[in-house]
Amino acid sequence: MEREKNQLNRLYLRLTLEKIKMDVIIYKTDGTKLKIKVNTFVEARAMVCNYDPNGLAEVVRLNNGSMLLIDEEGKLKNYPINKKATEMAHSNEAIFPSDYIVGDVLLFEDENYFDDLAYE
């Protein structure tokens, strides 16, 4: 009994120390849609902020329980408009009708999984 308990404890510890790899969809400004895996929030932020280490990411929550991760300063950086991300945000009333989203974005299909993503 004690041996089984120790094995379970070791397994639990190993699973909690492993980083969660999360499937996300990246929508690029050229219309490309790719399913990729991200390991950490820092990695996800780097993807949407063109690998700027000081980049600021912003969350756009959609009505269907998913969310977009975008570069908060993308308009200031003159990124091109992302038509697909803008359409998704408009159809979910997540941004004003006159607003738009720029740059590459990551779609997390379940915002609850985003909360489980390791920071680094």
Image (spheres, rainbow, N blue to C red):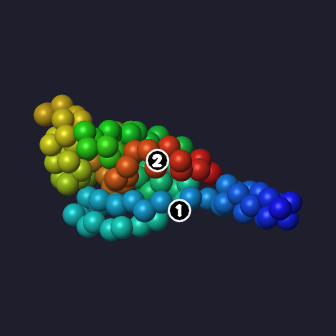
Q: Secondary structure at mark 1?
A: loop
Residue 76's image quarter?
A: top left
At x 40%, y 39%, the residue is 58
Residue holding disc 1: 21
- The total number of labels drawn is 2
> Does the image show residue 71?
no
Q: Quadrant of residue 24?
A: bottom left
Left or right, residue 54 beside residue 26: right
- Chain-order first, disc 1 or disc 2: 1
Between 41 and 100, the one nearer to me in the picture: 41
At which x and y percent is residue 102?
A: 27, 47
Q: Nearer the viewer, residue 91 or 100?
A: 91
* Up-down relation of residue 14 to residue 81 (above or below): below
Amino acid at the residue labelled 2: Phe
Q: Is residue 53 above or below residue 3?
A: above
Q: Amino acid at mark 1?
A: Lys
Front one among 59 and 71: 59
Report the residue marked by disc 2: 114
Element at label 2: helix
Outermost residue to the right: 2
x, y percent for residue 117: 54, 50
Q: Position of residue 36 (x, y in %)?
A: 41, 67
Horizontal and vertical percent position of residue 45: 48, 50
Q: Is residue 118 left or right of residue 32?
A: right
Which residue is pictured at 44% across the width and 44% down the height?
Answer: 112
Q: Residues within 10 Å of mark 1 (few under 14, many from 20)?
A: few
Q: Could one spot residue 113 in this view of the protein? A: yes
The Cα atoms of the two marked residues, 1 and 2, are separated by 11 Å
Q: Disc number at residue 39?
A: none
| 11 and 56: which is toward the camera | 11
Residue extending furthest toward the top? 96
Task: Please give left or right for residue 73 compared with residue 51 in the image.
Answer: left
